[in-house]
Amino acid sequence: MAGTERDLVLALRAELAGIDPARDCDRAAERLGLEVDLPGRWRDATLARLAVRLARREPGEAPGTAVAFDWPNRAEHCRMAWLRGRFLSHGSLSIANGRTHLELVVAPEEAPALATWLDDAGIPPSWRIRRGRGVVTLKSAETVQLLLRRIGAGASLLELETRQVARTLRGELNRVINAESANLARTVRAAGRQLDAIAAVTADGRLAEEPPTVRAVAAARRETPEATLGELADRLAIHRSAVQRALDRIEQLAFA
């Protein structure tokens, strides 16, 4: 990721870690979510500070003790607090090159259950086993944003969404510009070919023998070589198809 993208992810994690749950049950749930079995994770200063703060407010088992979370029987706010802890301790987020990718790396036996719980919450993931670990993945920007919003992200998520919208708009604008450029190039090539044909049939007198519509279209094309077929049709007050037939007729005469 670029530096700005990495800074945004760090800011988002700091924002989530800074949430102070008001309910005792949410603090307990988030502590369970923070349970870590990945080497080195407790060296993360943000996680360590969060664990200490939650322990002060909610004495009991220390984070790191494996205690199962009873998802089916917990309230929605407890589930989201647990997911927040899970994301902070086991999650990674990538937003490089306009692609949003969130992973939760957990014990292999937890992965299918976690995927089912997320799906039940309306946040459908995929999961697999990778190098002996369970990996639960969200690849859709919409589902990633939904998860982050529901676990408490605010200002950082808004900045992420703003960047993604801007990136989408830039992409759409580039597609429109490229399409217009291609259309203009085709129009210029066609107009050049038509002008050559008009010059050829004018020089040998065959244009004068054509119907008035063909002669009028030829004259309009000579006067406005940059005009589109629609613009020629508007100028002559005839259908676009009539303009196309007239120009096709001139080319057939010239290049047959």
Image: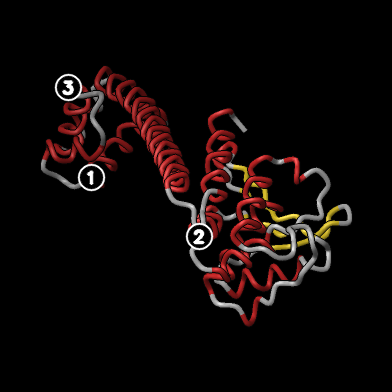
Query: Marks 3/2: CA distance?
Result: 58 Å
Closer to us: 150 or 179: 150
State yes or no: discs 3 and 1 in contact (Cβ < 8 Å): no
**Residue 240 — which label?**
1
Task: Point out residue 26 in the picture as x, y percentages from the top left corner.
Answer: 56, 67
Residue situated furthest bottom in the rendering: 73
Task: Point out residue 57 in the picture as x, y percentages from the top left corner.
Answer: 59, 59
User: In the image, is 22 to the left or to the right of 138?
Assistant: left
Residue 193 visible in the picture: yes
For mark 3, give the secondary structure.
helix
Pointer 2 residue: 146
Tag in front: 3 or 2:
2
Residue 32 falls in which quadrant of the image?
bottom right
State yes or no: discs 2 and 1 in contact (Cβ < 8 Å): no
Task: Give, as a three-letter code, the residue at label 1.
Answer: Arg
Task: Give, as a three-letter code, the residue at label 2.
Answer: Leu
Work out whether mark 3 precedes mark 1 in sequence or the reverse, and give the earlier one: 3
Q: Quadrant of the C terminus?
A: top left
Task: Give, as a three-letter code, the residue at label 3.
Answer: Glu
For mark 2, give the secondary structure.
helix
Residue drawn at point x = 68 percent, y = 46 percent: 48
